[in-house]
Amino acid sequence: LPLGYMVNEAVETAKYYSKKSFDNQEKFFKAATGLDDDFYTDYEHKDAEYKNINIKSVKNGRFSYNNIDKNAKGSGKVFYEISEAGQYYLSFINQNQKVRIFKNGKSTKFKARRGVIADLGICEIGDEIKVEFDVDAQASGYFDIRLVKFDEEVFAQYIDILDNEVLDVVEYSDTYIKGNIDVKNSGILYTSLPFDKGFTAYVDGDEVDLRSIDEGFITLALSKGKHVVEFKYMTRGLKLGALISGLGILLLIFSSTFFRNRKKKIIEEEPEKSDDEIDFSELEEIEKEGLEEKPINLEEIFAEEGNKK
């Protein structure tokens, strides 16, 4: 999909949940287009092995458990077998730090503190998927494991609808984007621009309010018809920083000019000495030198008398 495309207003009222990546994707595309077909299909696990873990319930991929010994760590292994060829993804959410995912015996390690979505690629019938993980020493907890098959044909139907009304970008730079769009029905322009207050949006030359879905990406409300859409970006705080810098430069120039003029004025006001003016301080120094008693050197006096003779 391009940088921006029209979606139904229902995307703003749909409920999205954290840690439900596959569900949220389907909810968004269904709300955006009005279609209702699933493009993810869940697969149940075939078998599982646990150490110091007692599974209480399994619902929609969430495994709730108790530690048999709450003072000891536990571990688990969950097995899947592929029954239909296609593109597969696996999501894993747990409170521990690492998870190991095996596909036909080949392992990949992931850090799973905030969850993992692993692209398993194209899987064939009979492929085996194994998930190994550890749990901390605690009384109880949960972990989420979901293996899903992605249906590209169904997903393509959603893309075809969204690709009918797109923003045609005609000009762009690092801080500016301009595009044209022909809106068939009033709705929401959904963009791939991250929601940031540094952006300013304009529709047909008029500034409009920025909108978003869960503060994810920028959206704009557009009415039916042809529109010119512009996005301008300026780093937050840049205007204030430039203003402060400008004031600092002006203050420096003012202070430099002020002190230079003040010094010049002081020099101009200082009286000049006339040729006839006597510096009495110098005369006093001369008089002091003339009146100052010098010690008598008898050897010099006798030497002078001898020379005279």
Image (spheres, rainbow, N blue to C red):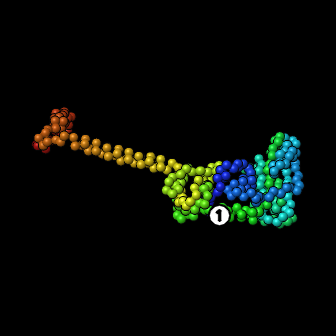
Q: As displayed, is residue 89 above or below residue 273?
A: below
- Front-most of 41 and 71? 41
Give the quadrant of residue 120. Answer: bottom right
In front here: 201 or 223?
Answer: 223
- Which residue type carries mark 1? Asp
Q: Is residue 171 left or right of residue 55?
A: left
Is there any visible trace of residue 89 in the rendered image? no
- Choose top left, top right, bottom left or bottom right for residue 80: bottom right
Give the total of numbered labels. Answer: 1
Where residue 119 sits in the image (x, y, percent)?
Answer: 75, 61
Residue 157: where, in percent of width, then height? 71, 63
- The reply, left or right, for residue 223 in relation to residue 83 is left
Give coordinates of residue 104: x percent, y percent: 84, 63
Residue under the point 77% across and 55% down: 91
SS at mark 1 in the image = loop
Q: Is residue 307 visible?
A: yes
Q: Nearer the viewer, residue 168 or 44?
A: 168
Image point (20%, 39%), residue name: 299
The residue shown at (68%, 64%) is 160
Q: Quadrant of the N terminus?
A: bottom right
Q: Which residue is mark 1?
A: 163
The quadrant the C terminus occupies is top left
What residue sits 55% from the left and 50% below the top?
209
